[in-house]
Each structure stands twice: as structure tokens, then as C-alpha cells.
Image (spheres, rainbow, N blue to C red):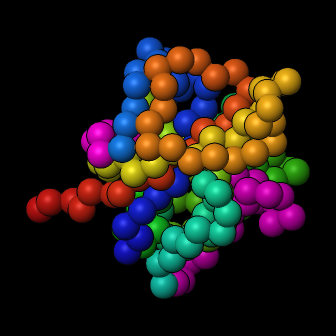
């Protein structure tokens, strides 16, 4: 099982939190969310479903990006305007995260998008502190902040285009920059 996780803290989520000062060693609880995944494997973030069980995997392949194979633990299927979507809770090698599955070109989800099936794909993870509860699917994951990685994209900044690491995130908004949090996952207690 993976002990560390890296995910993006969006400017919107940081604003909803009220811009708190976040520091190394601080415990927090978030819903890990993979956003929208496409059934088209040519997309950057995608999914496919199998009936047969496969070994669970959760492998970091980029900054905040993971390749995964896991079990669908919960599924909420929605059909509106002749389009099917699904919000899933996935357990991939002990990492619990939420994903929204988009339909194919025909407006339908691939066969087998429901509980107990195996799902494989690639996703960028986001930390959600303030959920809109548009779905009942989702579970908070406990962790301890280890460090922050910030990609400076503010126009005119001398460090434009550079990543830098820090052990704290100041309590001020960032409009253009991308912020990733690396954290140590807490082990679930029985």
C-alpha cells in the first residue's frame, strides 16, 4: 500500500477553506477526487472496467497523476438528457478516491460500471475539503501534510514556470499558480 499521496489543491478549494495557513506535520482530512474520467483511452484521464478481478495497483506516474487498478466500492449511476454518468468510490491498493465516469460518444457508460467490478485507468487527484454534496459517494481520507509543490504561473513573476517546494502554504490566495500537497496517509484503524 502507498504511504504517500500527492494531490492538487485548487484555488477554488483553498478559497472555500478560508485561506488557512497549512504547514508540514498538520493533520487533515480530504476527499480524494479524480475528476471526470473518459472511456476513451486516448484521453489524458481515462477508465476501463473489467468483470474479472485484477491485482490492485496505485502507481504515481506524474505530479499528482496516478495509474490505478482497483475495485468499485460504491456507484451512483445517473441518466439525464439521454446521457449516462457514474460517480464511483474506488479502492485501489488501499487508496480510496472518488471518480466521475463520462459516457462514450453514444451517451452510454461502458458495460459493467457498478459495484464489485474492477476498474483501471489514469487520473489526476484533487483534494476536496468543502464538498457540494451533489452526490452521496465519497469518503474522507486522513493524512498528515509533508510538503507543498508550487508551480509559479503568475504573470510577471521572476520565478514564472518554475516549481518550488516548501513546508508551508501561506494564508493568502493564489490565482494562477498550481499547488500540489504531498501527504502521508493515515492507516485505517479497525
- Horizontal and vertical percent position of residue 146: 39, 51
Q: Does the magenta stretch include residue 46?
A: yes
Q: Nearer the viewer, residue 164 or 67?
A: 164
In what quadrant of the picture does the N terminus appear? bottom left
Determine the residue positioned at 56% across, 48% down: 165
- Asked which quadrant contains residue 179, the reply is top right
In this image, 84 relative to 149: left or right? right
Q: Which residue lies furthest to the front in this view?
A: 158
Residue 168 visible somewhere in the drawing: yes
Q: Where is residue 24 in the image (x, y as percent from the top left)?
A: 36, 44
Q: How many marks?
A: 0
Q: Which residue is drawn at 29% across and 40% down?
A: 26
**Residue 152 against residue 45 in the figure, above or below:** above
Viewer can see residue 137: no
Please report the residue visible at 52 percent of the width from the left and 84 percent of the height from the top: 54
Magenta range is: 25-54
Residue occupying image coordinates x 58% and y 18%: 173
Percent coordinates x, y for residue 55 in the rendering? 48, 84
Q: In which quarter of the image is residue 12?
A: top right
Image location (x, y in percent) of residue 40: 82, 61
The residue lying furthest to the left in this view is 190
* 67 relative to 102, above or below: below
Indicate whether residue 174 is drawn in magenta. no
Quarter the C terminus occupies: bottom left
Along the line of sight, the residue nearer the viewer: 42 or 72:
42
Nearest the viewer among 129 and 81 is 129
Image position of 140 (left or right of 13): left
Amino acid at each position: 500500500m502507498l504511504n504517500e499521496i500527492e494531490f492538487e489543491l485548487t484555488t477554488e478549494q483553498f478559497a472555500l477553506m478560508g485561506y488557512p495557513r497549512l504547514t508540514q506535520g498538520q493533520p487533515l482530512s480530504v476527499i480524494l477526487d479524480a475528476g471526470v474520467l473518459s472511456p476513451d483511452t486516448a484521453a489524458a484521464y481515462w477508465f476501463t472496467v473489467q468483470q474479472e478481478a485484477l491485482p490492485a495497483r496505485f502507481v504515481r506516474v506524474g505530479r499528482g497523476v496516478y495509474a490505478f487498478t482497483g475495485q468499485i466500492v460504491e456507484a451512483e449511476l445517473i441518466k439525464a438528457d439521454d446521457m449516462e454518468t457514474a460517480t464511483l468510490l474506488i479502492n485501489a491498493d488501499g487508496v480510496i478516491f472518488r471518480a466521475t465516469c463520462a459516457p462514450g460518444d453514444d451517451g452510454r457508460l461502458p458495460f459493467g460500471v457498478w459495484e464489485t467490478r474492477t476498474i483501471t485507468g489514469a487520473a489526476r487527484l484533487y483534494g476536496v475539503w468543502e464538498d457540494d454534496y451533489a452526490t452521496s459517494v465519497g469518503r474522507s481520507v486522513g493524512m498528515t501534510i509533508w510538503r507543498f509543490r508550487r508551480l509559479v504561473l503568475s504573470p510577471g513573476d521572476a520565478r514564472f514556470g518554475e516549481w518550488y517546494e516548501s513546508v508551508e502554504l501561506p494564508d493568502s490566495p493564489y490565482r494562477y499558480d498550481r499547488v500540489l500537497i504531498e501527504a502521508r496517509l493515515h492507516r485505517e484503524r479497525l
